[in-house]
Amino acid sequence: MDNYWILFRNRVKNLVILELIALSLISYSAVGSDFHSPRTDALGGAGHAAPLLSDAIYLNPSFGSFNQVHSLSFNYLTYSGGTIQRPEGPIDYYGHNANISILDGTAEQLFQAGVGYTRRDDLNILHVGTSKSFVQNYGVGLGAKFIFPNDGTGNRITDATFSASGIFNDWIQSSLIIDNLWEAAPNLGFYREVILGTKINVMKIVLFYLDPHWSPTLGDSTFGYEAGVEFPFMSDLFLRAGTFKNSTIPYQAQRGDGYGLGFGWLAPKLSLDYAYSRAFIPIAGYSHNLGATIFF
């Protein structure tokens, strides 16, 4: 057990050091809830059953064991729209969001781990995820999020995520995620949520994603879903579309309805992705999301 703890501590320490070095390259602020990459945004927030590359850190830590690469991701989002009602009064929302992520999912390691950092106007978030595949095609994962509100108090809020994934065969895989286990910051929009993610692969021609979710403390808004579809072309170009209902809209820091569109291009050591996301309810707005991932 001591050897496992030492290995875990050293892995996280190394990832955080790399993260802090890379963070020196960016200076943007952000507004949002938990993070969506362009891949996730284009699918309407879906993809929990099979998050690509560093998306596993945020959507489903247990899938990190199946992304058997080292990756470094940069993401930048701009958003605009209408007015949000805040306690201090109505405000127009517009701005940008920045994120950086590092994932080590190589199979020869005892377990896989990743770390991601998102900067916001009201708070900053550090995500850490670890995973282990104990049985072939099945894995479990734990995630931690450290929330730092920009209110001058210096407080740190800690919450956690548990997930399990199974790749049943070539055409279907599924996952169960419990996010914000302790519901430590509901006033900031971090509600406990149970998500069932499903991915269906139809002869590698089209991929379907369906992610219903349940937030028990939200009363009349308890249930929602994200659903998406992805078309791969010639193994290196991907077209994506999705829709969501009563789901987190990262650039509005609240829940609502809308859709996403986007595409991705995959090179031998590089992935470039773009997404356009549109929200209808409760506030009309839109975002443009760009991402680049280097992997090896």
Image (cartoon, rainbow, N blue to C red):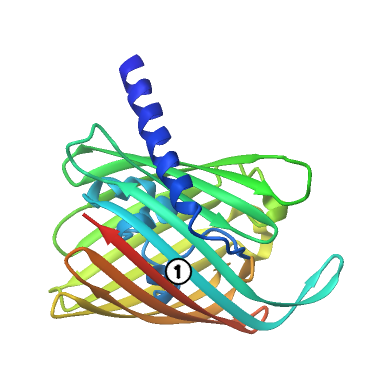
Quadrant including the N terminus = top left
Residue occupied by mark 1? 45
Q: Residue furthest right?
A: 88
Q: Residues within 10 Å of mark 1 (few under 14, many from 20)?
A: many
Q: Quadrant of residue 29?
A: bottom right
Q: Residue furthest top?
A: 2
Q: Residue at x 37, y 59 (%)?
A: 73
Q: Position of residue 10 (x, y in %)?
A: 37, 28
Residue 201 lies, with reference to residue 80, above or below; the image says above
Q: Residue at x 12, y 74 (%)?
A: 203
Q: 236 or 74: which is nearer to us?
A: 74
Q: 100 or 168: which is nearer to us?
A: 100
Q: Position of residue 5 (x, y in %)?
A: 38, 22
Provide the secondary structure element on which disc 1 rests: loop
In this figure, what is the number of numbered marks?
Answer: 1
Quadrant including the C terminus = bottom left
Q: Position of residue 285 (x, y in %)?
A: 61, 83
Which amino acid type corresponds to the residue marked 1 in the rendered image? Gly
Q: Residue at x 16, y 79 (%)?
A: 205
Q: Quadrant of residue 198?
A: bottom left
Asked whether the viewer can see residue 250, the reply is no
Asked whether the viewer can see residue 150, the reply is yes
Q: Position of residue 247 (x, y in %)?
A: 55, 68
Q: Quadrant of residue 51?
A: bottom left
Q: Residue at x 33, y 46 (%)?
A: 62
